[in-house]
Amino acid sequence: MEPVHLPRPQSELPDLNISNGQGLLQWISTVDHKQIGIMYLLFSVLFLCIGGLAALLFRIQLALPNNAFIGPEMFSQLFTMHGTTMIFFVLTPGILGFSVYFTPLMIGANEMAFPRLNAFSLWIAFFGALLLYFSFFNGGAPDGGWFNYAPLNEKQYASGNGIDYYCIGLLLGGIGTASTAINLIVTILQCRVKTMGLHHLSVFVWMVLVNSFLILAAFPAINAALCMLLLDRQLQAHFFDLSAGGSPLLWQHLFWLFGHPEVYILILPSFGILSEVFQVFSRKPIFGYGLLVGSGIVIALLAFGVWMHHMFAAGLGITINGFFSASSLLIGVATGVKIFSWIATMWGGSLRFTTAMMFACAFLVEFTIGGLSGISFAIVPIDWQLTDTYYVVAHIHYVFIGGSLFGLLAGLFYWFPKMSGRMIRDRNGKIFFWLFVAGFNMTFLVQHALGAMGMSRRVYTYPDVPGYGTLNLISTCGAFIMGISVLYLLYLLIQSKRYGKEAPGDPWDAYTLEWMTPSPPALKNFEALPPVHSERPFRDLKIERQEK
Amino acid sequence: MTHACQILLTIQSVFESATVESEKVNALTFRFIIAGSFIFLLVAGLLVYVSVKFRARLADAEPIQARRNIKAEVAMIGIPFLMVAFFFYLTIKTMEATEPSVYNQKPDIIIIAHQWWWEARYPAKNAVTANEIHIPVQKKILLRLNSADVIHDWWVPSFGPKMDMVPGINNYLWLYIRKPGIYEGTCSEFCGAQHAWMRIRVIAQDTVDFQKWLTAAAMPARQPATAPALSGRAIFMGLTCAGCHAVRGTIARGRAGPDLTHLASRKTLLSGKMENTDENLGKWLSHPQKIKPGAHMPDFILNKDTLTALVTYLHTLQ
């Protein structure tokens, strides 16, 4: 192959001269996007275990009616930390890990645009997470739920330090996330290999780009809200304090103006990963490239016009409810298009059911359930019935696990050979897949019924009403199956990294540039790159080679 | 937790409509269930079909590299769009029908949520009660909902819509209950440690029974007749009880805790936590923080006689 195009950035990179011996100090001091990506994923896995442990503890408490395994104070702390951890310190680093690892590789760049900023973002978010957990040693963790409504979050009702740690921990995490978003935007817009136009970007990179803009627009709202809350708590400001003219609902507006886009922030990169997985394992190009990218942009724009559907039960009136119902329903259409596009991608293909593809297919089913229950919340009267019940708990888990996490797991099994240089035995991957899918559905499917049966969310116990005990026990058993499956995944990853078969550069016969590199890629990603004519440049190259 | 006696009959699910409002919401819900099932079966069916039909075979040639199909794309957007448009229409229609604007109408019942109990006031007769809320059937009732502290949420599943109770804001809910009976509900917005034990019990009565109850509820408390009850009253007024609780007709006028004027006529204690018996009331008075940790009633040190006298007095408050 002729060295046709040199990757960007062309200038000497700060870290390219040091050795790639991956000692601990080198990991800590690295600015290499691949190592940072892997550290993001380890960060995510670490907190997945911690947040999962919190969930198992309160699921034990909920396994039986009138149980007294943990008291109400500890219960509130555990469910708050579970939600906050899973959203800000598991899914967020998960999506950022894949984004910073693969974005430069897929656009033919050797580094992120700002390598040092990249390292800064990781570490500040990580220390934010540690600070949040330090609250346990200083008077108790935050206990207001992950969306932490006012005025329950004010000093008057939450006199401990937990909420202050919540504010600072999330502010630090938010700084990390927002600076990574800037980094990704500049990287994608500035560091692509010369011949790669925006219409040649893979769907994953498109989603990362859209997502980064979404992050930049959404995070200021929560950062402002967190600062206001800190001022209220520490300096007696009165933003959310009714008695001094503040407004408790203001918190909800600010929080959900961030919070709803956040849901899409956590899923758009997964949509991107799935688009890669579906096309590679169907051996077909993605169906409706424009439609997928376009609907992603539509989702990102609409994301800022739907936040009040979290407040349909707040009594804001028919006009407001109607407007936000319409915008939320439209998001359903934009998301539905994606589901059908992926099925159409599989249609007529030659499907290889690897573990990654299994997760992608399971995603279609689980995310459709989560999407449909989501639409039921856009229909205001149904929302009036079911919001703030276990039905909504089921819904968010079908979206965050069945959607975001299944996408990330598909990405993990798809890219693990590239990142580690080793293969995971497909049979073992499938054992994990079935365990996880069974545990997940067992835990959360029954929660739809619990919600409809009148069980409201965030209760530390419940009376012995017929049905409640059985369904909750099933849910708890499912949670333990999920817990075991996650332990099995950890074992599988460590075992594969140590003893797995060595991975070739391109084990899946894939389409995008990252598979051009050896597995794992060298510290300098590319020496030279082929010209790009389509969104599948590596396939073009392979065909060209064959023809020669 | 043996002291949590089982007092709930059963809880009605959202599908067991007890009000006109709930019937309207459920008519919409059932339509959505049908449409949602259709979409789910379509996706699952297509996935199964595709997985079986297009599974890779050994030495497959590369499949046709189809990228788009305008007709399919139009259908993918058009059909879901029409479906959500239809549901948007139903949403607006149902909202208008179930929760029309209130304008300046006076509420029949004012419900004020507290951490962690419910206060119900009946402006027509100046009656006040707590946790067990009596509502007449076969009559359109307007509830005004408010909160004294944090945000709570009124939710009786078989009544249809729930409504947040936001401090400083008056929210309203219409109710037309079809049949007399007992309806269970619960606070549905996380409101602190004892959110779980903030259960609602609605006692729906026909007009005659309701009026009878209301008249009784509006009366001041009975004068205790026996010696232990009299000494109980003296203790109640002398200790700090009267600072937080009201017993109408006495000097006790506190409003931080539930009105106790007719405590003995209530079937449950502590928002559905336990049955209203002498034994349970005694347990509660001696260790509030053990029974309902976090509740705003502090632990008192009461000796046995004091306790018995208090329980006796409170249970004369028919």
Image (spheres, coloured by chain):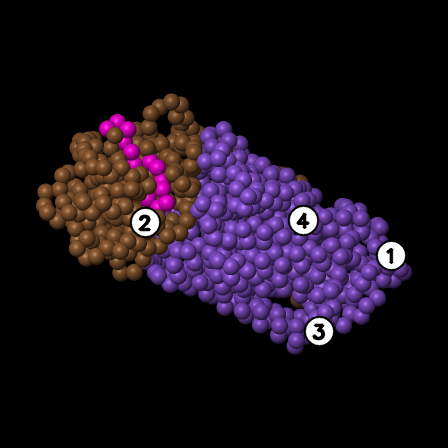
Decide: few, some or many residues near mark 1? Use Cα within 10 Å; few <14, some 14-19, many ≥20. Answer: few
Under tag 3, what secondary structure? loop
Label 3 or label 2, whichever lies nearer to me, is: 2
- What residue is shown with label 4? A178
Q: Are marks 3 and 4 in contact (CB under 8 Å)?
A: no
Q: SS of the residue at dot 2?
A: loop
Would you say A193 lies left or right of A273 here?
A: right
Residue B15, horizontal then vertical, whole percent: 35, 43
Determine which residue is flagged by label 2. Answer: B297
Mark-to-mark CA distance, 1 and 4: 26 Å
Reading the image, the residue beneath label 1 is A11
Magenta residue span? B111-125
> Label 3, on which residue?
A502
Question: Looking at this rendering, what residue extends furthest in the top direction?
Answer: B104
Comparing marks 3 and 4, which lies closer to the viewer?
A: 4
Image quadrant where one finds the C terminus of chain A: bottom right
Q: Are marks 1 and 2 on the same chain?
A: no
